[in-house]
Amino acid sequence: MDVWDTARRARFQAVAPSGLTVRTADEFLLWVEATYPLLVERVLERQVDYFRRKDHITKTQAGQGLVAHLAEAGAPGFARQVAERVRS
């Protein structure tokens, strides 16, 4: 997994075209969730259903697995948001 450190991110932002903001995966996913919550809700439902059917597990287990995958992929903040959604 490639996680950007602060110095690398600053260097990339310095060469990014004007008007673009460099975001981590976590920041981007949190922005999408804040901007398009209903879209994120629909996608999460589809993802949980996919894992449920693929692995023959309960909806709760599938949601927990999705949260774990997101955290491992470098999106811990978004994973926490997803955990809140799949609990309700």
Image: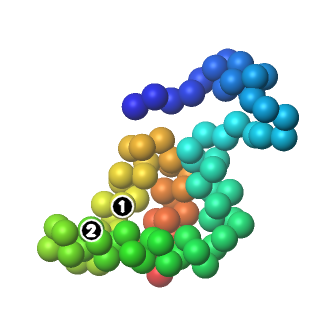
Q: Which residue is mark 2?
A: 51
**Along the horizontal axis of the image, is 74 left or right of 50?**
right
Residue 6: percent from the left, percent from the top? 66, 24
Give residue 66's mark: 1
Location of residue 50 (image quadrant): bottom left
Tell how many labels.
2
Q: Position of residue 29 (x, y in %)?
A: 59, 55
Residue at left offset 57%, top offset 47%: 26
Numbered disc 1: secondary structure: helix
Q: As displayed, is residue 2 above or below residue 20?
A: above
Secondary element under disc 2, as helix, strand or loop, is helix
Q: Is residue 10 above or below residue 87?
A: above
Where residue 73 sits in the image (x, y, percent)?
Answer: 42, 43
Identified by mark 1, the residue type is: Leu
Residue type at mark 2 is Phe
Q: Which mark is residue 74?
A: none
Residue 80: tell me if it is visible: yes
Horizontal arrangement in the rendering, residue 16 relative to residue 59 (left or right): right
Quadrant (top left/top right/bottom left/bottom right) for the N terminus: top left
Coordinates of residue 33 in the picture (x, y in percent): 63, 65
| Residue at (42% x, 52% y) in the render | 70
Q: Residues within 10 Å of mark 2 (few under 14, many from 20)?
A: some
Q: CA distance from mark 1 to mark 2?
A: 8 Å
> Is residue 6 among what the camera can see?
no
- Residues at circles 1 and 2 in contact by the CB criterion of under 8 Å: yes
Tag nearer the camera, 1 or 2:
2
Query: Does 8 appear above or below 25?
Result: above
x 47%, y 81%: residue:
88
Q: How is the image coloured?
A: rainbow
